[in-house]
Image: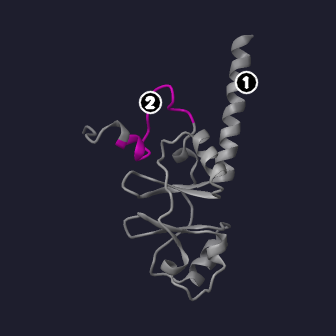
Amino acid sequence: MDYVDGKLDWVAAGLPTEGKDAGKPTAGSIARHDSPTCELSESLGEVKKRVRATGWDSCVVINSEQVVLGTLGKKELTGDPELSIERAMRSGPSTYRPFVPIGEMAHELVDRDLPIAPVTTSDGRLVGLLKREDALRAFHEGRAHRRDDSAAMAS
């Protein structure tokens, strides 16, 4: 079966690619796929307990189709436990596609002072949650590998 929606939609869905950039880290390859999620029907108290138990300090709010609706960060998770998720969340967060190079993501997260960024498909479905610290680490590791490769080629 052939994929008919085109190359950009393919990479936006986080599907594997070929070519010179195929092995380079991207938002989708570094994003954590085990990030906690919750739905609007839950209470902040129950979500906070579940998120803390996993060692995270943030959560992605999704609907039944895995479409990102909002986020709960450290600040939101300290709110009134009786609050609905809809009232507690930051709605309409900026989302990023899986194919965005990790260097671009690292700069974006630092420049906008974002601790996390939801990575989604082109139709808004959650791929994973990218932590700023993970993006920075991958970016710096990538730069170190390029320097090592350049030094090896020069010898």
Label 2 element class: loop
Quick one: label 2, few (<14), some, or many (20+) residues within 10 Å? few
- For residue 54, the mark is none
**x, y percent for residue 41:** 45, 81
The range drawn in magenta is: 9-24
What residue type is disc 2 on? Answer: Glu
- Whether residue 126 is in magenta: the answer is no
Residue 78 shown left or right of residue 62 in the figure: right
Residue drawn at point x = 45 percent, y = 77 percent: 40
Which comes before the other along the chain, label 2 or label 1?
A: 2
**x, y percent for residue 34:** 56, 60
Vertical placement of 114 versus 5: above or below? below
Residue 4 shown left or right of residue 61 in the figure: left
Count the labels in the image. Answer: 2
Q: Residue furthest front?
A: 111
What residue type is disc 1 on? Answer: Asp
Distance from Cα at disc 2 to Cα at disc 1: 23 Å
Q: Quadrant of the C terminus?
A: top right
Label 1 element class: helix
Residue drawn at point x = 69 percent, y = 14 percent: 153
Q: Which residue is mark 2?
A: 18
Q: Which residue is mark 1?
A: 148
Residue 54 shown left or right of residue 43 in the figure: right
